[in-house]
Image (cartoon, helix red, strand yellow):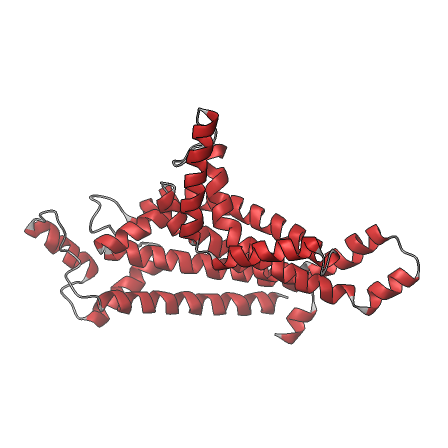
Amino acid sequence: MLSYILKRLVQGILTVWFIATATFFAMHNVPGDPLTNDRAMTDTTRANLEAKYGLDQPTTTQYLIFLRNLSQGDFGISFVQENREVNDIIREHFPVSAILGVLAVIFAATGGVLFGALTALYRNRLPDYLIMFLVIMGISVPSFVVAALSQLSLVAFNNLIGFTVIPVAGWGTILHMLVPAMVLGLSTMAYLTRLMRSSMLEVTSSDYVRTAKSKGVPATRIFTRHQLRNAILPVITVLGPAIAAITTGGFVVELVFAIPGLGRYFVEAVQQLDYTVIMGTTVFYGAFLVFMVIIVDVLYGFIDPRVRLET
């Protein structure tokens, strides 16, 4: 098991290095001067930044400086936000994105397992047709459309009641988090529902389920001990990447609902060509995604030892 974990860690480190390298060279191919912005910059400030990041040096030297700083956990200083380090931006705003992501994952996983099991139990009947229609809608409709429609619905609902029951935007209370989390987790829930349905149908037709039925085992026990327990394994496999994707993919939702998360600052950095923030957050998001995949691989190795033998 130790060699399996070490192999996954080495693969993860190489993946993060590739992400950092690709991000660095992609940003250096963007036209323009990274130190040019709307505010006036003194010659001393410009000289200090050029010395720190080697901007007056060849690209290879800048790349080595970037890797050295990255290995020390230093993502640099924002070129746009005065006296703010990228590390501070991540430290202050990623917890907001993480809280929103955790709530969205709980919503997506619970709904995906529940609705997927229901569609398998009621296959080719009304509940199956209705849920699958909603699943197709959840996958097809973009998140920014769902977010906008959700806000319009909240405005209409609050106007109908006469006072604000659920805030339309902002952050601070559980009511602020409720609708954005549902919007963020909707597409993932739809995907997990389809996956759970397919897995449940495969398990239902397996030999050990038929054997349990022939022995007279109660239907409830067959469902909980045999069908659900085995059908949920594929869902666990994709849950790690899904968690990372939800946690790091709420850019549009954070913008629409005015949530001060890291995704919102990433979008602003792209608009303002704040190179250090773009590179820092991209590498951070990539490392987080790789870390979650490794965690799920290790957990799945404990659940199913065959994974360790086949890799």
Most extreme residue toward the bottom, as rendered?
A: 310
Q: Quadrant of residue 294?
A: bottom right
**Which quadrant of the figure contains the C terminus?**
bottom right
Most extreme residue toward the left, as rendered?
A: 43
Q: Nearer the viewer, residue 274 or 202?
A: 202
Residue 16 position (above or below residue 263):
below
Q: Quadrant of residue 205?
A: bottom right
Instruction: Give the image location of residue 118, x and y in percent.
Output: 70, 53
Q: Nearer the viewer, residue 309 or 282?
A: 282
> In the picture provided, is 261 more to the left or to the right than 231?
left
Q: Quadrant of residue 151?
A: top left
> In the picture provided, is 298 more to the left or to the right than 163?
right
**Which quadrant of the figure contains the N terminus?**
bottom right
Instruction: Give the image location of residue 198, x and y in percent.
Output: 67, 64
Residue 99 visible in the shown view: no
Query: Residue at image x 73%, y 67%?
Result: 202
Q: Nearer the viewer, residue 39 or 173?
A: 173
Residue 206 visible in the shown view: yes
Instruction: Give the image location of residue 8, x and y in percent.
Output: 53, 67
Query: Residue at image x 27%, y 47%?
Result: 85
Query: Residue at image x 57%, y 65%?
Result: 5
> In the picture provided, is 173 more to the left or to the right than 58?
right
